Image: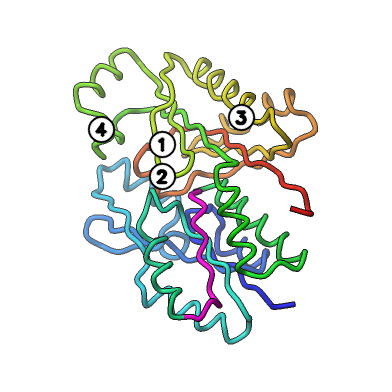
Amino acid sequence: MSKIAFVTDSNSGITQEQADELGIFVVPMPFTINGEEYFEGINLTTEEFYKMLENEAEIFTSQPTPETIMKMWEDILEDYDEIVHIPMSSGLSSSCSTAKVLAEEYDGRVQVVNNQRISVTQRESVIEGMELAKQGKNAKEIKEFLEKTKFDSSIYIMVDTLKYLKKGGRVTPAAAALGTLLRIKPVLQIRGEKLDAFAKARTVKQAKAIMMEAIEKDTQDGEYNLQIAHTQNEEAAMELKEELQKIYPNRKIYVDKLSLSVSCHIGPGALAIANTKKHSSDS
């Protein structure tokens, strides 16, 4: 059985410390903030990031350099036979397509998974991939399975402020002004390639109800893991966990911060519910 290494990026929410515990490798995502380069989890903490965001810093997301990725792969391949590389959704960053091109140089030893996930659902892909490796699947089989099941997940996000969506050009200034006036709490969805509008709510309670109803519909055709994610909104996230646990008493609910690459587009105060389908061990 080949020895398989798993590589993901910090958009998965997996920290460098957690990566060490899991026995995997995490590429820190780069950011340019006020003209300086920072790396998530290396010289940029979540708290520092939000402070800069609130102070109107110019923040741009970036992708790791090809040299960074190839150096990591080459170091790993000294100890492992194969690599399964799970980057963030190809619809949200070009880092996936870059990795796919780079992988062509490695004679099939590096399999790049384009399963179009991010944050807590991307983390689930890593966990599921590791389970498949334990079952004896090789890197190519794991890649194929994770891509085949890529749409078996969704994230719904309640945005607390329209300021950052406006800044990123995702809503027009007029729509943002009207939405702020009406105190609209938009609910967005990430499923597959894009971050899309899903619904509009007037209160946090209504937005949570919309997300919970969407999750209920999504999870009727099998067993699902549930996740909650947030941007500087941990207290509300834990309250939401309690509410969901009453509805789904037998399900584990994982809570984590939304990745900074998503956070810079939606700002603090956001709350998200995600679901990922559980697949049988003989899949």
As drawn, the label of residue 218 is: 3
Amino acid under disc 1? Pro
Q: Nearer the viewer, mark 1 or mark 3?
A: 3
Q: Nearer the viewer, mark 1 or mark 2?
A: 2
**Distance CA(mark 3)–CA(mark 2):** 22 Å
Circle 4 residues within 10 Å: few <14, some 14–19, many ≥20: some
Look at 63% across and 56% down and name the residue there.
145
**Distance CA(mark 3)–CA(mark 4):** 29 Å
As drawn, the label of residue 84 is: none
Look at 60% across and 48% down and name the residue there.
149
Q: Nearer the viewer, mark 3 or mark 4?
A: 3
Instruction: For mark 2, give the secondary structure.
Output: helix
Queried whether the magenta region covers residue 83, the answer comes back as no
Circle 3 residues within 10 Å: few <14, some 14–19, many ≥20: some
In the image, which residues are magenta? Answer: 106-117
Q: Nearer the viewer, mark 1 or mark 4?
A: 4
Circle 1 residues within 10 Å: few <14, some 14–19, many ≥20: many
Q: Nearer the viewer, mark 3 or mark 2?
A: 3
Q: Which residue is mark 1?
A: 268
As drawn, the label of residue 262 is: 2
Amino acid under disc 2? Val
**Distance CA(mark 4)–CA(mark 2):** 14 Å
Give percent across and percent down for residue 11.
47, 54
